[in-house]
Amino acid sequence: MPERTCRIAIIGAGPAGMAAAVSAVEAGAENVLVIDDNPRPGGQIWRGETDDATAREWMQKFEPCGAALLGQTRIVAAPQPGVLLAENGAKTLTIRYEKLILATGASERFLPFPGWTRPNVMGAGGLQTLAKGGLPLEGKRVVVAGSGPLLLAVADEMWHMGARIKCIAEQAAPNAVMRLGLRLLGSPGKLAQAVQLKLRLFGVPYRMGWHPLQVDGADGTSGDDSDAPVASVTLTNGAAKRIQIPCDYLACAFHLTPRLELAHLLGCDTEWIERQCQRRTTVDAWQRSSVEGVYCAGESTGVGGVDAALIEGRIAGYAATGAQDRARPLLKQRDAWRRFADAMNETFAPRPELRMLPEPRTIICRCEDVRYEQVVAKESWRAAKLHTRHGMGACQGRICGGAAEFLFDWSARSSRPPVCPTRMKTLAERPSADQKGD
Amino acid sequence: MKRAYDILIAGGGIVGAACADELARRGADVCVVEAECAGSGATAAGMGHVVVMDDSEAQFALNHCSQQLWNELREALPENCEFDGCGTLWAAADEEEMNEARRKADHYAARGVAAEILDSAALAEAEPNLRPGLAGALFVPGDSVVFAPCVAKWLLDRAMENGATLITGKRIVELRSDGAVLNDGSIISAKRMVNAAGSLAPQLTPGIPVRPRKGHIVVTDRYPGFVRHHITELGYLKNAHASDRDSVSFVVQRRMTGQVLLGSSRQFDVTDAAIEPGILARMIQRALEYMPGLGQLNTIRCWAGFRAATPDNLPLIGPHPTRENLWLATGHEGLGITMAPGTGRLLADLMLDGEALIDPAPYLPARFANSEARHG
C-alpha cells in the first residue's frame, strides 16, 4: 500500500487549512501535506471563487508556499496514533504524521418539517452547488429559509444567476439579529460585506423571525401526504400569522454545524454549547485539542466564518511547528473573532419552537425513511437506531444526527470507523508497523 | 413500597427478553432491568443467525428445539424483525472440508434436519460472487436470519402485555438474594433473580465460568442480490473453537435491507469494545479470499461486541449451584440468538413447572460446581 509520510498533516484545504499550511511553512516546517476530498483548494466557501479579494490573497499565498496538496482524498480511519487511512480515487494510502491539524469545516444543519423531503426542497448550499453545476435557475422562483448569514450569501449568488428570490426567511428573532448587527460595527470588514449583500438584494423581503411551517405539492397535497415536487411553502412568525409563497425551489438550511466525525474518531474532546445549540471541539489557546499532537482550527472549534478560520489556522500552523512566538500576537484578535462567533451562533441557534415543527408522519431519517412518530418516544439515539433504523443508513447520522440532537437532546456522536462510506478493501489494509501485533 | 416481584431478570438482551416473555406468559410477575435499551448488547452486535449446530448432542438438542420455536414465532414477528428464511450455506474450500460437509449432512439427516450437498458448480450458481473453484457446500434450508434487537424489543413488549415490568437505562450494581441494587441507589425486591447479562454476567455473579469473547462485524451499503444466503466457511469450526488464540473466519450474510453483513473474529481477554484495525483487516482479508468482489462494496459501519463464552461451549441455564435464589441464563457464545427461545422455555420449565421440554442436565450451571476456582 502506498504511504505518505509528513511532518504536519492538515485535513481540509479551506481557509483554516490553507492558513495553517502557509503559516507552518513560513515558520520553517518542511513536508507539510494538505488533504482535501475536492481536487482544488478553497473549501466549501471559496470553491471556484475568483472575485473575493481575501480568497484571491490566500490562494496566491497557498499555491506557491511549498505545502503539498493531496486532493480527491478522503480520510476513512485512524488505525493507530500518527497514522491515517485514506482513499484517493481507486487507491488506498496510509498517511503518517507527527502533527495533525483538523480543519474539517462545517455543514448545513437540516431540521425536519412537513414536506421537507419533497423534490426541489434542498439544502441552501446544495441548491447553490447544483446551480453552479448547470441547473438552470433563470426565472425560477426561489424561497430561501432557515437561519444564518449563509442564507444571504446563497440568495445573493442565486439572484446573480437569474433566480427570482421571493423571500428570505430567517428564523432568528428581529431584535437578536439587530443586536448582532450592532456588534458588527466593531468589525468593519464584516459590516461592509453584510451591507453590500443587503444592497444587492434590495427588493427581496428579508423576514426575520419567520420560519417554514409546511411545504405543499404541485398535486394539491400538503405536508407529508405525497412526494410531489414543491409548489409553495407556508411560513410563520410563530404567532397566528402565516403566509403561503408559491415557489419552484425552497433552499433551506438552519445555520451550520461543525463537522466533527474525524475529531471524534481520533478521540478529541468535544463540548455541547447549549446556548448555541452546537457541539464543537475543545481547544486551548494554541488550538491544541485534548489529543497529543492534534490541533483543530476553523469551523470545527465552533462556526465562526472565514476570518476566525484564517486566524485559527495561522495559530495552529505556527503552534504545530513550535513557533508559538509567531502565534502569540494573533491570540487577542482570535479571541475577539471567537467572541463574535459565539454571539453569532447564539443569534442563529434554532428557536425552541422549531422542535414542534415535525408532524407524526414527517420523515426525520432520509436514508432509512424513518418517521417522527416512530422515534419520538424512544429513550435514546441508540434505541432509535436499534428499534427503528434511524441513522443506520449510508449517512450514519451525519445528516440526521444534528436534527436528533436538537429535537430530542440525544447525543448522536460516533467514533467508529469508517468516518465515511469506504471500500471494504481499504479496511483490509494494514500499515506495516501493525503487522506483528496480531 | 412496591411488593417483591416473583422474578427479576438482569439483562434485556434477546436471552433475557425470551425468558421474560416465557415467564410472564405463564403468570409470573417479572421485572427486567436493562442497562441501556432492549437488545443493545451482544444481541445488537451479532449477526442474528438462527442456525442448527451440531458440535455436541446437547448443543444440537437446544438449537433444534429453539429453531422450532423460532419457526412458531415467525408468523407473529413484525416486519422490522426482518425474519429471512434464507438458509445457511456451509462453504467447503477443499476435499477435506467437503468430507466434513458430507458428515454433517448425514448427521443432520439422522436427526430430521433437512440438508443438501451442493457440488462446486451448484455452489457457484447459488452464490455467483464466491470465488470459482470452491469444492462445494452443505445447504441447510431451515436456518434463518433475524434483526435481533427488534425481536428482543418485541418479546419484551409482549412480556409487558402479560404484566411484566421493564426498567431501561439503569444498571444493576449488585445482585442480591432478595433483589437488586441499581446504580441510582434504588432497590428492586424479588423472590428469585435471573442473571441474563451475557458477557457481563460474571460482574454480577463472580465466579461463574463465562468469559467475554470479542467479535467484529462490518456492514455495507445496500447491494441487493450480492449475497443470497448466510454463508459460513466450514473452516470456521477449526478456526473458531480450536484454541484460545485470536481467530477470524469468513462469515457473510444478506440482510432484508439489501445490505451485506460480514464477520467474524474471536478474541479472548479484550474488554475494550473499540474497533481493532489489525484483526478487522485480517477478518476482511479472509473474506476476500472467498468472495473477492466484497472488496469493492462500500462499508458504512464497523462495530465490535462480546459473546459470553463458556469452557464447554454450552450455555448456563438453571439454578446457581450455591447461591440462594439465583438462576443463570447466559454463556451462549455465538448462539444466543438461535438458543434464546429454547432458553426461555427451558428456564421457565425449571423455575415454574419442574418439568422440562428437553433434558436440562447438560446446561445446568452445577456441572462446573467443582471447577469454579479455575475459572473464577
Image: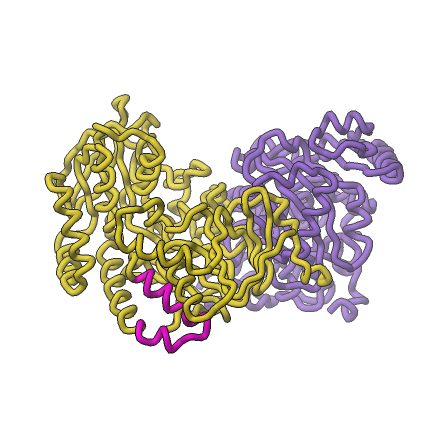
Chain colours: A yellow, B purple
Q: Which of the two residues, B208 or B101, is positioned nearer the viewer here?
A: B101
Residue at 62%, 33% (x, y): give it.
B84
> Residue A213 in magenta?
no
Query: x and y percent of residue A228 in the render?
Result: 32, 25
Q: Quadrant of residue A289?
A: bottom left
For this view, does B11 lie left or right of residue A305? right
Toward the viewer: A21 or B104?
A21
- Residue placed at 68% from the left, 59% from the top? A432
Is residue A262 visible to the viewer in this orientation of the structure? Answer: no
Q: Residue furthest top?
A: A219
Q: Seen in the image, is A196 located left or right of residue B99?
A: left
> Which image quarter: residue B146?
top right
Residue B144, x across and y down, in percent = 67, 35
The residue stretch that appears in magenta = A308-330
Q: Is residue A209 above or below residue A338?
A: above
Residue A241 in sight in this render: yes
Q: Residue furthest front?
A: A64
The image shows a total of numbered marks equal to: 0
- Which residue is more in the foreground, A162 or B26? A162
Residue under the point 43% across and 55% down: A12
Does the magenta stretch mainly form a helix, a strand or a loop? helix
Residue drawn 17% across the image and 61% down it? A188
Residue B115: percent from left, percent from top: 79, 30
Name the residue nearer the viewer: A138 or B207: A138
The image position of residue A318, as x and y in percent, is 41, 70
In the image, residue A427 sits, relative to residue B201, either above or below, namely above
Q: Quadrant of the C terminus of chain A?
A: bottom right
Q: Quadrant of residue B262?
A: top right
Q: Identify whether A306 is placed above or below A232.
A: below
In the displayed orientation, state which residue is furthest to the bottom: A325
Tell whether position A317 is magenta. Answer: yes
